Amino acid sequence: MLKPDNYLKIILQVILYLASATAFADGSGGINLPEQRNKPYLILVSIDGFRWDYQNRYNTPALDRLATNGVRAERMVPVFPTLTFPNHYTIATGLYPKNHRLIGNTFPNKDQTKWYRMQDREAVQNGEWYSGVPVWVAAEKAGMVTAAYYYVGTEAKIQNIEMAYWNEYDASVPGIKRVTQVLDWLAMPVDKRPHFITLYFEDVDTAAHRFGPDSTQTVAAIEQVDGYLDTLFRGLEKMSIADQLYIVVLSDHGLLQVLPDTAPFIIDEHISLDGLAVIDHGSAAHIYFPTPDPQRLVKIRDAINSVWKHGKALLRNETPARWHVTAAAGFAELIVQADPGYIVSSTADRFPSNLKGHHGWDQEVDSMHATFIASGPRLPSGIQIEAINATDVYPLMMEVLGLQITSPIDGDPAKLLQLLK
């Protein structure tokens, strides 16, 4: 017969087991496991729409200092479609959209009964839309605390894993407040301090859409974000963990001037779209058929291509291999892609008349290319490398955090891992 104190020991062991099982299901529980506490720290900074050549053309002393102390890629080539949500999540998972399932900013599920929309908080926070293993999920599973001041996917429980600290997206929050919070997170006690942190700025993208990618307003936004980064970097330099820090600054896509005095191509002025679901991106229109109708599909394609000289309608199986468009991933049956600088819209009333700069064109277009800079203790200083792909960043982040990649990815580990000391 067990003594009362033995009963107590058994009960405590059961409680501890259940607590650890719950922490694993829901993430780290906000506490770093002992084996994670000496691991490096990684801050992933995303500057939405920061085109690959902006650093060369405009005043960015903070970014210049980061590049001098680290590695800079000549450019980073995004995935198709060159939109914010697919590319951010590709960077976080190392997967093409066809594999991580976030195939646009807006798209339906397979039977078109539900829709993912970036403005829909319920959808954005529903982990069922997201596949792959983003860095923060791998980290939390391993008992490593993570935090996000915005980033695509960080508001959702993916694989039933939630970040220890995250924020619901609110564009009105000043950039300097976001920076201050990152510094506060890194000043936390070692057991609670996040090892992976995301930080996002939309200023450049917002200005470029409204005023153009090389407007005075966009240049001012570039300089403002560089100022935020200067505050961040100076704060980090004063920390005791400065020699354990990795910083990755990148963007999701570039930006291109919408051609002025050029009328958009309006699809329904040439053929009926009745009964079809159309996702208008400005640079492209994705046409979904609720029920298969091969004859109508071809008819619409041919009608568009017979009259439009500044773009092309493509059946899903006609798209370039570099787009990685598949039926299994839920891509539209017909993709109407404008040539660079031109705009297409399903109807006249859906065309954004004040659009001066945009993205969403083929990733081969020079102006769609993004930025990549990284620094940290195992990276060389002052090195510029050739172009990388958005899928190539994930292996680097996982390696510096000491996390294992447990499922296939689309990125090339050799691109960046070969740089590590």
Image: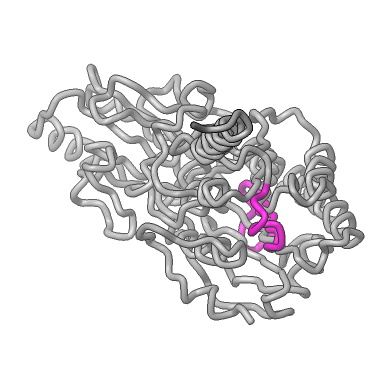
**Eyeballing the image, is 34 above or below 152?**
below
Q: Is residue 407 left or right of residue 27?
A: left
Q: Nearer the viewer, residue 312 or 238?
A: 238
- Residue 44 magenta-drawn? yes
Q: Is 356 in the magenta?
A: no
Q: Is residue 282 visible?
A: no
List x then y, in percent, for residue 81: 41, 47
Is residue 60 rendered to the left or right of residue 407? right
Q: Which residues are magenta?
A: 32-54
Q: Nearer the viewer, residue 130 or 365?
A: 130
In the displayed image of the protein, which residue is found farthest to the left?
295
Residue 319 drawn at (x, y percent): 25, 52
Residue 238 x %, y %:
92, 60
323 left or right, relative to 238: left
Residue at figure coordinates x 82%, y 45% from the top left: 188
Name the residue rendered at 47%, 76% in the picture.
Answer: 414
Residue 12 versus residue 389 in the image, above or below: above
Residue 393 seen: yes
Quarter of the picture containing the C terminus is: bottom right
Residue 295 image point, x, y percent: 7, 32
Question: Looking at this rendering, what residue extends furthest in the front direction?
Answer: 1
